[in-house]
Image: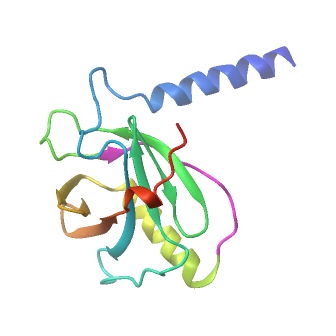
Amino acid sequence: MRVQAIFLMAMTLFSASCNTVPNGFSVSSELNNTQWRLVSLEPMAEGAMAIPAQPELTLRMRDNQVSGYDGCNDFSGPIVSSWGSSASALRFGSFTTTLVPCQGEAGKVAEAYTDALAQVESYVISGDQLNLYFDQGRSTLSFSRMPAAETQDDA
């Protein structure tokens, strides 16, 4: 029993160290405390994927953490940087997610969304539009900013 407890503690510490943000890294002020609604997903070989109006697929960035909803499950994880590259570089660490079974078209969209987020390399904000680029800039996740009245503050 004691060995199991030590093993679990060691695994927790190892997992935490894998998701640590480098010293001095902070999410850009233009991304911090923002919430976004996915409006289009253009994966590599499939063209644009239809995004359902309900449920909304969301992305929230706050205090070096990202969280959201993929249409089936809530997810969260650290925001990390490809430090040493451009100011618009952005990468997400490993996600923790709920495990609600998701099938059919909703399951395909949820999987494509979280797979694309795991590959994000950079971003551009223009007004109330956020584009996250992956696949060496050939594919895009496009979001619209959610009005403050629609965002939830869990502080």
Q: How many marks?
A: 0
Q: Is residue 7 above or below residue 110?
A: above
Which quarter of the image is occupied by the N terminus? top right
Say if the magenta span includes residue 60: no
Image vertical order of residue 127 relative to residue 31, above or below: below
Q: Is residue 25 left or right of residue 148?
A: left
Tell me if I can see residue 134 in this picture: no
Q: At x 30% / y 55%, what residue is drawn?
A: 120
Residue 143, image x, y percentages: 32, 66
Expressed as whole percent of the image width and height from the top left, the position of residue 144 reads 31, 67
Q: Which residues are magenta?
A: 91-102
**Residue 137 higher or lower than 45, as above or below:** above
Q: Residue at x 78, y 20 (%)?
A: 5
Residue 14, position as x, y percentages in the image:
55, 25
Where's residue 109, x and y in %? 49, 75
The answer to whether 154 appears left or right of 100 in the picture is: left
Identify the residue shown where x is 68% and y is 58%.
99
Q: Residue at x 19, y 69 (%)?
A: 138
Q: Quadrant of residue 27?
A: top left
Magenta region includes residue 92 = yes
- The one nearer the camera, 153 or 2, is 153
Coloring basis for residues: rainbow
Task: Residue lying at the far right in this picture: please name it.
Answer: 1
Which residue extends farthest left? 86
Would residue 55 be seen by someone viewing this image from the given angle? yes
- Depicted 18 relative to depicted 37: above or below: above
Q: Residue furthest front?
A: 149
Residue toward you, 29 or 91: 29
Q: Main secondary structure of the magenta part?
A: loop
- Choose top left, top right, bottom left or bottom right for residue 84: top left
